[in-house]
Image (cartoon, rainbow, N blue to C red):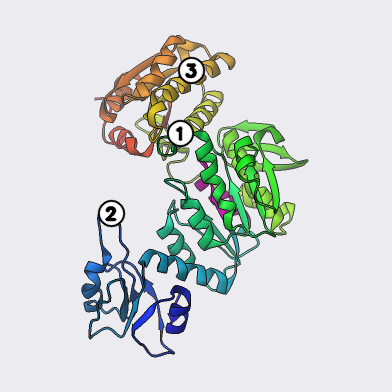
Amino acid sequence: MKFNEKEIVSATEAEVLKKSDEERKFGISTDTRTINKGEIYLPLKGENFDGEKFISKAVEKGAAGYFTTGGEVLENAAAIYKVDDTLTAYLSLARFIRRKYNPKTVAITGSSGKTTTKEMVYSVLSRKFKTHKTLSNHNNEIGLCQTILGMEEDTECLIVEMGMRGLGEIELLSKYSEPDIAIITNAGSAHLGRLGSLDNIAKAKSEIVKSLNPSGSLIANNNPRLKTFTSGYAGEKIWFTIADVKILEQKRGYSRYLYKGREYELNVEGSYNIENSLAAIEAGFKLGMSYEEIREGLLAYHAIEKRWESEEICGFNVINDSYNANPESMKASVSTFLELYNNPVVILGNMGELGGQEKELHREAGKYLAEKIRALKIPAESVKFLTVGHLAEKIGKSLEDGGIFVKNFENNTSAARFVIDNIPAGSTIFLKASRAMKFEEIIEYLRENNRS
């Protein structure tokens, strides 16, 4: 997207320190490494960096001008704009574009499943509309700006994913994206260490409705806390839960189910994936799509990287679901694996950001999985769990108390070596951990080594 000076000043309320040609249009760049000739440099600041230190470098590389908070004026810049805060200016430019082209905007947040849900919503909406989405999980303030400014002028639907580190952040993202539809996938214990309580987590997620179109819709998991903290939104509210679903068939890489009397299919397994898809279904109907369009959109969805990726490695079938983990997602994904595979081998790692309750939450996850194995009537001797890390060891202790084989390792290499030396060829191995555990190291070790 490009702006003329009038638009820049209107959007950001900038003071013009050096005026440009009124007809000239500028792209915006926040990175001197990739800035193009003729763009305006917008220097961002963080705890460990200050983009304003690179203003002169940006101009040397061909930037037409720049934003500044300090009033620095360089002679060889064609346009200079002074603002109080450059991030606010960036967000304001994004909101200007969102209002100018006015795509139907769908905002998605939640403790888990938001990126998967975003991809499902995109798969559905793109069957009918020209749709633009947040790339990967770029779900903070900068990612929001990049997403909005990166869309094409004829975009009909805009999908923005919203993450958060604390209270107030989703409210800010909602303020500058002004969604027509807001989706809350759930409000679980992820980020409990940062927010301190489940109430605060639900409160933070519910901030998404602060700037939700009053004529729009909230589509949210049927959670009592979410109902409490979204009660101030006067628009339409649609609540969904897996309890609303009748599962007709579930097997490896496939699910078929009924929701509100209609049949849908997914090329992924797992009740949690089915539950995520309900938000996509509801969003599709709210935007006027037909049942057939929505059904085809869901069937076209494919799992994203590090989410239930299946690969043959060193004689094993390895399923990698280690993009992230919290107690709810770990219980759901491991349960699905146990239901679908014989003689399961599960490698679990630490779950992060759980605060003072982290040990108990890991122990509780182990208890839940031990009970699940009993409920499924899986012989305890046919299941193997490997754990990596001091917190995952707590999961293992609860499983051991249930009579299940568990071995703990201090690092990924030791766990991978144990697999090669002790797990029979042909076994299916499931990996689940927080991203910080770097479980891709296990996969790389298996690829690079053999049984010799």
The residue wearing badge 2 is 47
Of the residues shown, which amino acid type is indicated by label 2? Glu
Task: Please report the residue visible at 56 percent of the width from the left and 52 percent of the height from the top.
Answer: 208
Magenta residues (range): 107-124
Say whether disc 3 or disc 2 marks the residue closer to the N-terminus: 2
The residue at the point 53 percent across, 30 percent down is 332
Please tell me whether residue 440 is drawn above or below residue 391 in the rendered image. Answer: below
Helix, strand or loop at label 2? It is loop
Q: In the rendered view, would you say 380 is above or below 94?
A: above
Tell me if I can see residue 427 in this picture.
no
Q: Position of residue 257 (x, y in %)?
A: 69, 37
Question: Mark 3–mark 1 contact, CB under 8 Å?
Answer: no
Residue 206 x %, y %: 57, 46
Above or below, comparing residue 76 to residue 394 in the picture? below
Q: Which residue is mark 1?
A: 326
Q: CA distance from mark 3 to mark 1?
A: 15 Å
Q: Secondary structure beneath disc 1? A: loop
Estimate the x, y position of residue 233 in percent, counting from the top left. Answer: 65, 51
Q: Amino acid at mark 3?
A: Lys
Q: Which mark is residue 208?
A: none
- Looking at the image, do the residues carrying marks 3 and 2 touch, with CB atoms under 8 Å apart? no
Does the image show residue 379?
yes
| Horizontal arrangement in the rendering, residue 319 relative to residue 117 (left or right) | left
Disc 1: CA contacts within 10 A as few (<14), some (14-19) or many (>=20): many
**Residue picked out by circle 3:** 367
